[in-house]
Image (spheres, helix red, strand yellow):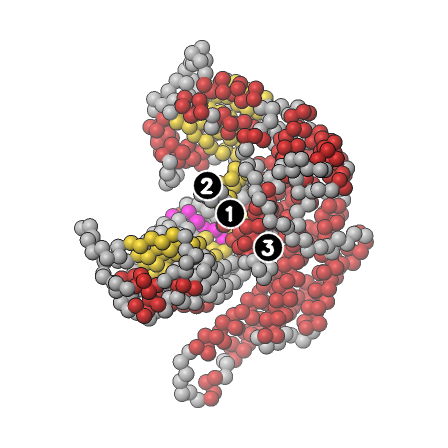
Amino acid sequence: MAETLLSIVLEQLASVARQRIEQEVRLMVGVKKEVPHLTEVLQTIRAVVADAEKRQVTEERVKVWLERLKDMAYQMEDVVDEWSTAILKLQIERVENAAMPKKKVSSCCIIPSPLICFKQVASRRHIALKIKDIKERLDDMERERITFNFVSSWSEERPQRLITTSAIDISEVYGRDMDKNTILYHLLGNKCQEKSGLYIVSIVGTGGMGKTTLAQLAYNHPEVKAHFDERIWVCVSDPFDPIRVCRAIVEALQKESCNLHDLEALQQKIQTCIAGKKFLLVLDDVWTENHQSWEQLKNTLTSGAVGSRILVTTRKESVVKMMGTTYMHSLGELSREQSRALFHQIAFFEKRSWEKEEELKEIGENIADKCKGLPLAIKTLGNLLRLKNSEEEWKNVLNSEVWQLDEFERDISPALLLSYYDLPPAIQRCFSFCAVFPKDSDIERDELIKLWMAQSYLKSDGSKEMEMVGRTYFEYLAARSFFQDFEKDDDGNIIGCKIHDIVHDFAQFLTQNECFVVEVDNQKKGNMDLFFQKIHHATLVVRESTPNFASTCNMKNLHTLLAKEAFNISSVLEALPNLLRHLTCLRALDLSSNPLIEELPKEVGKLIHLRYLNLSKCYSLRELPETICDLYNLQTLNIQECHILQKLPQAMGKIINLRHLENDRADDLKGLPKGIGRLSSLQTLDVFIVSSHGNDECQIRDLRNLNNLRGGLSIEGLDEVKDDGEAEKAELKNRVHLQRLELKFGREEGTKGVVETLQPHPNLKSLLIYNYGDREWPN
């Protein structure tokens, strides 16, 4: 993790040096000498970080040194990014000034004002002082490094492209036939089992034992599907929130999103939906021992028909007793033979009749034995060694000292650590970042990649864009069993996943003070200030009204804030402007699904490092402040399903690094600012609107510079195009990456030759044309 952070800082230092020369930006006296020295020390430290990260598990002093190093790396990243942004701002201002109409003015008018000059000098001095301070502190860490005698082992290995494997492949479920049959017996029932009250079946076992897999096998069994009127699956996890669980049940029953937030209303809806019906409710990964919380849910489920079942998975027998379980099924470890068979199938996948199979078989059996019958550990190491062909590599895994560590008595398997150590550093960092998500979260692949981009974890290698590098990393992690429960598109590509709770625990173990899911309530807010100083990535969960929590939280070091649904309480929403004023280092901000947000505070313009901003499903959002155009580093802006948002700020053309403008289903958006046509880095633009409101908004010709667009594009308002020549200027034939294109005409009759003139590229896979030549509209 630290190695990747240091690599990011080194790359940024080199980039800033290039920018400084190209833009003729002068530094304060002395800083010109500091930067090469800083680079040299960082390179020296980076070379030993891999050894330090392995030793931190057993050496507390090394662990403390690494924590300090990571904190300093974050600070260095912030300073260098601030420097880079200052140069970028200067570049944008020069371009804008050059584009302004020339007027006859006296020569004195072209002299910059004293205030502007002072601000530029003050900014350079501010950055220079920060760099000098960091250099001095880094020198102290370098002196400490020498005393540890670390082994230098830095290399820039790039992962090969891998084919991902299915998370639930029935052929990979070993030794669970008797368990499955027993669970089916209790779910399907017989007359002697039928009685009043809830019939609860609990599967209990340690982490990674296959409880969820067994529940999935039963849930998807054909007889179970035919037996129950309704089947509902809810990932409960920790903490147990009755409102969230009830809402998930309602959504599963109605097969659509639920906007209810009151527990009483949710309970009544559930009772109505299941009344007189035989249902199966799976509550996966239950931790709570709070009987009162369970009773709130339990009493809601009594209106179902006789024969209904609740299937629970949990690690704790105390949970089983608290819930009043009818039948408890203890899930044991796999037998020695079953463990070996499972390992062999995965490790030798697509290597049948392989000449080294017999040579490595005995080593593989010994490795499988060390996994102690845990299916998750066996799959993890099987997927690791599937990619290794030498006897030495297999023996290194078998004889690793990791198997002896006491740290993993808490259900964190040595298999995960071995697989993690084998990842290239950049992918290690991408994986550990996933600790920021709550357990059992549905993770969208493309959104995760954009979050990685926002943290500068991905870099283009010349032949691949950042997004493609991110896909490679994602597939690499999926193939190593770090992800599971895959959602796939029609072509079999993985577009979503989950993380096993044990793997999530492991990610949290790796990040320690970096990534947290933070619950904010009145009882905890007193000690939040100190807590937030230590973390860099957080998901914010607000459990109850906390009107002043933002004023007590020092969030200045936060790089990621995921606050989906966190501002659904008006008293908490009032704290948002104050909260944003504290987030001076923020790179990713997710405010999606907050329907109370009517306008984004202008303070967002101060977040100069921001690269990812998600405002999707903010149904009441009416406008974006002009200050959003000061976010020169912004890469992703998501305003999907902001139904009443009518326009975007006029100066959007200043956000020259914008790569993804997701504006699908922003129904009231009537046009796009003219400057969007200058955003040549745009890869995603869901909807391009041809405006009829003059030169301040985009016309069809403004598409001509957006040559990087890919995926799908919908062009609306084509009836406004009255001239075939204007349509030709869009140069759609140059959009080689577009796969889907929609052409939408409105009520007014357009020029008949527009469609022919647009001429999309032959690579197009899908073309839909709406209302062309059709003048019959419904009343």
- Residue 604 in percent (x, y) is at 47, 59
In the image shown, does 232 or 394 lie closer to the viewer? Answer: 394
Classify residue 300 by image quadrant.
Answer: top left
What residue sits right under mark 3 in the picture?
Answer: 457
Mark before the other along the chain sequence, 1 or 3: 1
Residue 105: tell me if it is visible: yes
Q: How busy is the neighbourhood of tag 1: few (under 14 within 10 Å), some, or many (20 plus)? A: some
Q: CA distance from mark 3 to mark 2?
A: 35 Å
Which stretch appears magenta?
589-595
* Amino acid on which disc 3 is placed: Tyr
Instruction: State if disc 2 and disc 3 touch (CB < 8 Å).
Output: no
Judge by depth and name the residue closer to the eye, 363 or 400.
Answer: 363
Q: Secondary structure at mark 3?
A: loop
| Distance from Cα at disc 1 to Cα at disc 3 | 15 Å
Amino acid type indicated by mark 2: Glu
Query: Magenta stretch: residue 591 in it?
Result: yes
Circle 1 sits in a helix, a strand or a loop, which is it?
Answer: helix
Name the outermost residue toward the top. Answer: 192
Q: Residue 663 location in percent, x, y? A: 39, 55
Give the amino acid at mark 1.
Arg
Mark nearest the camera among 2 and 1 is 1
Using the image, tell me which numbered label, if any, was put on residue 95. Answer: none
- The residue lying at 58 percent from left, 24 percent from top is 176
Main secondary structure found in the magenta portion: loop
Query: Is 80 on the left or on the right of 297, as rendered?
Result: right
- For mark 1, what is the residue? 445
According to the picture, the residue beneath numbered tag 2 turns out to be 544
